[in-house]
Image (cartoon, helix red, strand yellow):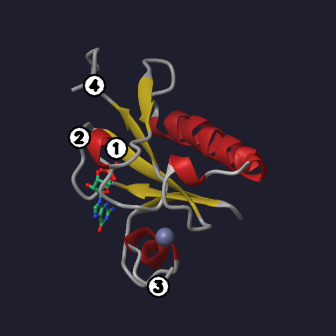
Amino acid sequence: MTDCLFCKIRDGEIPADRVYENDDVVAFRDVNPQAPTHVLIVPKRHIATINDLEPADAALMGEMQLAAKSIAANEGIDEDGYRLVVNCNSRAGQTVFHIHMHLLGGRAMTWPPG
Ligand code: 5GP
Ligand code: ZN
């Protein structure tokens, strides 16, 4: 995908503060953090939204959760707790149409979410 922000970050064309990377996933700090820890976990392959997932993507989604577990431990927020959020389409507030999981932690969270 040529005009995708997260593809450009993946390719190093746009700088980002990377905290994790493996063959399938890259993670970097959100430029507008909503919590002391706010990391975006992104599959390297461009997939626009959760609605576009196929059964063959199941392992990739698992990789994202395992990345979240690892990053939370590195950030020292695993025991206190953290929140994982994936927004899908406009009503949920998705603004970048390349799937990403928000990892939010370092403060108390409220429920229900806004
Ligand atoms: P969404 O609203 O699509 O679920 O989340 C997109 C996120 O990407 C937002 O939290 C926003 O702050 C973040 N973001 C937007 N542009 C950039 C950027 O250039 N660099 C980084 N690191 N994060 C970005
Ligand atoms: Zn992309």
Q: CA distance from mark 4 to mark 3?
A: 36 Å
Name which residue lies at 50% across and 35% down. 72
Looking at the image, do the residues carrying marks 4 and 1 touch, with CB atoms under 8 Å apart? no
Q: Which residue is mark 4?
A: 107
Name which residue lies at 42% across and 26% down. 82
Answer yes or no: disc 2 within 8 Å of ligand 1: yes
Q: Position of residue 2 (x, y in %)?
A: 46, 85
Q: Which residue is mark 3?
A: 2
Q: CA distance from mark 4 to mark 2?
A: 10 Å
Looking at the image, do the residues carrying marks 2 and 1 touch, with CB atoms under 8 Å apart? yes
Dot 1: within a 10 Å radius of its alpha carbon, few (fewer than 14), some, or many (20 or more) residues?
Answer: many
Q: Amino acid at mark 2?
A: Gln
Q: Which is nearer the N-term, disc 4 or disc 3?
A: 3
Instruction: Kindly state the secondary structure of the residue where label 1 is placed.
Output: strand
Answer yes or no: disc 1 within 8 Å of ligand 1: yes
Name which residue lies at 46% across and 32% down. 76
Q: CA distance from mark 3 to mark 1?
A: 26 Å
Q: Which residue is mark 2?
A: 34
Q: Which is nearer the N-term, disc 4 or disc 1?
A: 1
Instruction: Kindly state the secondary structure of the residue where label 3 is placed.
Output: loop
Q: Position of residue 64 (x, y in %)?
A: 61, 46
Q: Which residue is mark 1?
A: 38
Rendering quadrant holding ligand 1: bottom left
Dot 3: within a 10 Å radius of its alpha carbon, few (fewer than 14), some, or many (20 or more) residues?
Answer: few
Looking at the image, do the residues carrying marks 2 and 3 touch, with CB atoms under 8 Å apart? no
Q: Position of residue 92 (x, y in %)?
A: 31, 39
Closer-to-camera residue (51/17): 51
Q: Amino acid at mark 4?
A: Arg
| Left or right: 14 in relation to 12 | left
104 in relation to 3, above or below: above
Q: CA distance from mark 4 to mark 1?
A: 11 Å
Disc 4 versus disc 2: nearer the observer: 2
